[in-house]
Image (cartoon, rainbow, N blue to C red):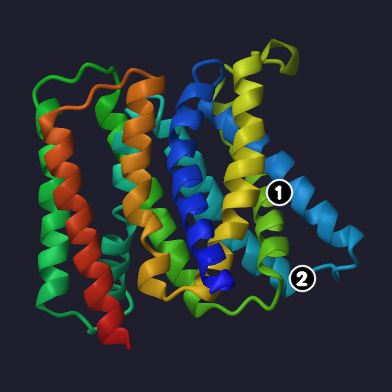
Amino acid sequence: MKTNNTAYLALATTSLIWGSTWVVMKWGIQGMPPLQLAAIRQLLGGLILVGFFLYKGEAFPSQKQLFQIFILSIFTFVLANGLSTWSLQYLPSGLAALIGALYPLSVVVMEYFIFKNKQINTATVVGVLLGIVGIATVLSEHVFISHTPGFAWGILLASIAMLSWSYSTIMIGRSKVNINPYFGMGWQMLFSSGMIAILALIKGNNLAFSEIPTNAWIAIAYLIVMGSLLAMMAFIYTMKHLPAPIASLYAYINPIVAIMIGTVVLDEHITWQLIVGTVITLLGVYLVNKSFKKATA
């Protein structure tokens, strides 16, 4: 019973922290360029993880393992994390989190069309359609007039980030990298930090370290300690001690947490389109998750 209670506590921790990271990223990039923030976050987080495991005697990855980790880092941290952070320059944190929550839907679509996985039933199709309708409902208020310059660009960045996370999820499931997952994640962060830093230099407008404001450093510290370390450990613990359908509930809670905190902290407005669209979208994600896992089982 104690283990079960701890697992539910870990699930709540994961949901709340990962939901809050969208708002913290949005808050942090108010003081510095988003790609620069992402690069610094990945660099420091990677150094902490890799340094810790090397200190504990973890074997240095082989050349093959490093290559596999490098490829994963492109999709998981450069495209998924880097572009989602960039998208927050143009989107409300709640909307960006909601687009990110669509990844189970795109995983199913990719599995079907790219990897020829035919384990799809009527509930799966209905779920995908509901996800599309939900997002369309949220975006309906921005179709003709957007209050944020670059809104369409932000939607594109967030969508690419979500698709990249989906593809990396499939890659991780199909490729067997025989390495401690935390250690491997640290190497992914290190690889991605260099690539994101190059993108940040190309984009320009980077700040000198002495010019980065305090709120941005606080955001980076929170994203590293809480988002990349504590929440990830809680998530892995949840996956080990709770059934997969329950452990995956964080995906439905994250956008709700981001919307609520964003409303209070960043004064982001809640509209009826956002509420209705969020409910429809998360219902679609739930149906897809449930039907796909049932078919796989």
Using a 10 Å C-alpha cutoff, classify the residue at mark 2 as few (fewer than 14 neighbours), some (14 to 19) or many (20 or more).
Answer: few
Using a 10 Å C-alpha cutoff, classify the residue at mark 1 as few (fewer than 14 neighbours), some (14 to 19) or many (20 or more).
Answer: many
- The percent coordinates of residue 49 (x first, y second) are 75, 53
Is residue 159 visible in the rendered structure shown here? Answer: no
Which residue is denoted by mark 1 in the rendering?
Answer: 190
Q: Secondary structure at mark 2?
A: helix
The answer to whether 165 appears left or right of 66 in the picture is left
198 vs 81, nearest the viewer: 81
Quadrant for the C terminus, please.
bottom left
- Who comes first in sequence, dot 2 or dot 1? 2
| Residue kind at label 2, given as amino acid type | Gln
Tell me whether the residue at label 2 lies in contact with that at label 1, contact meaning CB atoms closer than 8 angstroms: no
- The percent coordinates of residue 176 (x first, y second) are 59, 80
| Residue kind at label 1, given as amino acid type | Leu
Residue occupying the far top of the picture = 211
Which residue is denoted by mark 2 in the rendering?
Answer: 63
Gap between marks 2 and 1, in whole Å? 16 Å
- The percent coordinates of residue 35 (x first, y second) are 55, 31
At 18% from the left and 20% from the top, the residue drawn is 146
Residue occupying the far bottom of the picture = 297
* Number of residue marks: 2
Q: Is residue 294 above or below residue 211?
A: below
At 20% from the left and 44% from the top, the residue drawn is 278
At 64% from the left and 75% from the top, the residue drawn is 177
Q: Secondary structure at mark 1?
A: helix
At 64% from the left and 37% from the top, the residue drawn is 41
The image quarter containing residue 181 is bottom right
Is residue 169 visible in the rendered structure shown here? Answer: yes
Q: Is residue 226 above or below residue 92?
A: below
